[in-house]
Image (cartoon, grey):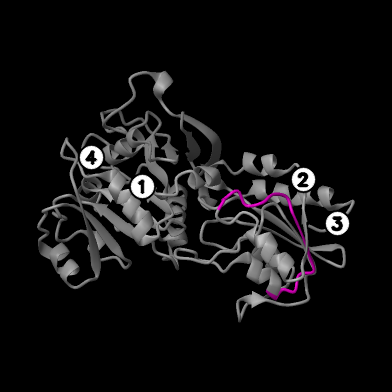
């Protein structure tokens, strides 16, 4: 590694601050990263990674510095000569990656020097990005003593690294002030207001896949597409439907909306109607799963297949209550986001049903809250901390 400048540690504080301005709710399972671009010792650009699937912090800093060719979608060489980044730039390619490696972008920008606060904690990639830059002639400086600070604001990223065999899983629901997700009739449109629903669509747009159960499919008849701001997102998540018997209503809106669909069916199920037609036409895919001793589909096998066979790293689960309760009991939920409306519904429609915890001391704790006021609604997001 190269020499340390007197101002590197001080300037790195700005990159660390930029990282904390990002929301783990939108970046996970990627890390929160900040970057500062310089030319001739002067700061010319600042960037942070704001959403999973979107530009990384290094690319955002190049864009703000004017070092980005929008037509070619590549860096402009020679505009930036130095960059400070809170985490080692990514260097890997592979299935499911939506952006090019940042090391390639920095080399294309003809970077002369880079200062990094911490190595990538992923053992598969740790140090690889720094080595690639150094081997290409870039002066590389790795600061000491900052790894713990980077880890402190990247709990969701570290959670995902600890579960490489399945996706990072976010449970989402809208509820009244008393915690009910529907009225006594089962109707849930609309508990939350338009601003909360817009953010829900933004969460869909930055997820690899969206999962719902058979009850939600029949009761709510969702389209399950991403429409942030009233317009369809460029990226549509894989829609995963847990429907053991393959008995989706023939007029279900999910058949009419664009985007790929994957059906989780029980072994031996015989789909009929439009589902059978879509499967025969190869426009839909099916995953046939065994049942457990209580007759429920093997969720652990489904999650492993989503990660292994479909490249799903971020999974958004929007119901129903039994599906979400089962994932929590399985220890397969990493975070939760709830949109609380100023309503009192009463009744029995709770957000999590099924097996619970015998005592409060056994229940998972919630941490790293992110909250926002969205019109009259309150959004609260938490990481789920495993004991």
- Residue in front for this viewpoint, 302 or 200: 302
Which of the two labelled residues, at mark 3 and mark 1, occupies the earlier sequence position? 3
Q: Where does label 2 land, which residue?
A: 144
Q: Which mark is on residue 186?
A: 4
Which of the two labelled residues, at mark 2 and mark 3, occupies the earlier sequence position? 3
Q: Is 315 part of what is drawn in magenta?
A: no
Q: How dense is the environment of label 1, judged by Cα within 10 Å: few (below 14), some, or many (20 and up)?
A: many
Q: Where does label 1 land, which residue?
A: 317
Q: Is residue 106 left or right of residue 256?
A: right
**Separation of disc 1 and disc 2 at Cα?**
39 Å
* Marks 2 and 3 in Cβ contact (< 8 Å): no
* Residue 40 spot, x, y in % from top left: 87, 67
Q: Is residue 345 above or below residue 275?
A: above
| Residue 171 location, quadrant | top left
Magenta residue span: 108-123
Which of the two labelled residues, at mark 1 and mark 2, occupies the earlier sequence position? 2
The residue tagged with tag 3: helix, strand or loop? loop
| Residue 49 location, quadrant | bottom right
Q: Which mark is on residue 3?
A: 3
The residue tagged with tag 2: helix, strand or loop? loop
From the image, state whether disc 3 or disc 1 is nearer to you: 3
Q: Residue, x 33% and y 20% (percent of image)?
A: 358
Note whether residue 181 is visible. no
**Separation of disc 4 and disc 1 at Cα?**
19 Å
């Amino acid at each position: 590694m190269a020499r340390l400048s007197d101002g590197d540690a001080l300037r790195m504080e700005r990159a660390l601050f930029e990282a904390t301005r990002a929301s783990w709710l939108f970046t996970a399972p990627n890390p929160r990263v900040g970057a500062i671009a310089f030319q001739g010792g002067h700061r010319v650009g600042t960037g942070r990674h704001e959403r999973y699937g979107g530009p990384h912090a290094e690319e955002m800093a190049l864009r703000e510095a004017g070092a980005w060719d929008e037509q070619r979608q590549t860096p402009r060489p020679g505009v930036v000569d130095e960059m400070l980044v809170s985490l080692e730039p990514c260097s890997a390619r592979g299935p499911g990656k939506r952006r090019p490696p940042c090391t390639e972008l920095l080399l294309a920008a003809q970077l002369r020097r880079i200062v990094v606060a911490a190595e990538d904690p992923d053992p598969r990639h740790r140090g690889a990005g720094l080595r690639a830059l150094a081997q290409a002639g870039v002066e590389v400086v790795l600061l000491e003593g900052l790894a713990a600070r980077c880890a402190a604001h990247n709990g969701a990223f570290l959670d995902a690294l600890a579960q490489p065999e399945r996706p990072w899983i976010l449970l989402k629901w809208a509820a009244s002030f008393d915690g009910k997700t529907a009225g006594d009739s089962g109707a849930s449109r609309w508990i939350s207001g338009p601003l909360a629903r817009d953010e829900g669509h933004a969460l869909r747009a930055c997820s690899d896949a969206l999962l719902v159960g058979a009850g939600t499919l029949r009761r709510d008849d969702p389209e399950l597409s991403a429409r942030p701001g009233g317009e369809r997102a460029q990226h549509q998540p894989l829609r995963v439907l847990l429907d053991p018997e393959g008995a989706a209503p023939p007029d279900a809106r999910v058949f009419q909306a664009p985007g790929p669909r994957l059906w989780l069916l029980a072994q031996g199920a015989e789909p009929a109607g439009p589902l059978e037609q879509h499967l025969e036409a190869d426009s839909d895919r099916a995953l046939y799963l065994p049942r457990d001793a209580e007759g429920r589909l093997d969720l652990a096998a489904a999650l492993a297949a989503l990660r292994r066979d479909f490249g799903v790293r971020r999974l958004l689960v929007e119901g129903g209550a039994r599906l979400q309760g089962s994932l929590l009991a399985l220890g397969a939920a990493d975070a939760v986001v709830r949109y609380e409306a100023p309503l009192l519904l009463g009744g029995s429609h709770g957000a999590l049903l099924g097996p619970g915890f015998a005592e409060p001391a056994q229940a998972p704790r919630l941490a790293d809250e992110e909250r926002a006021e969205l019109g009259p609604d309150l959004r609260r997001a938490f990481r789920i901390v495993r004991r």
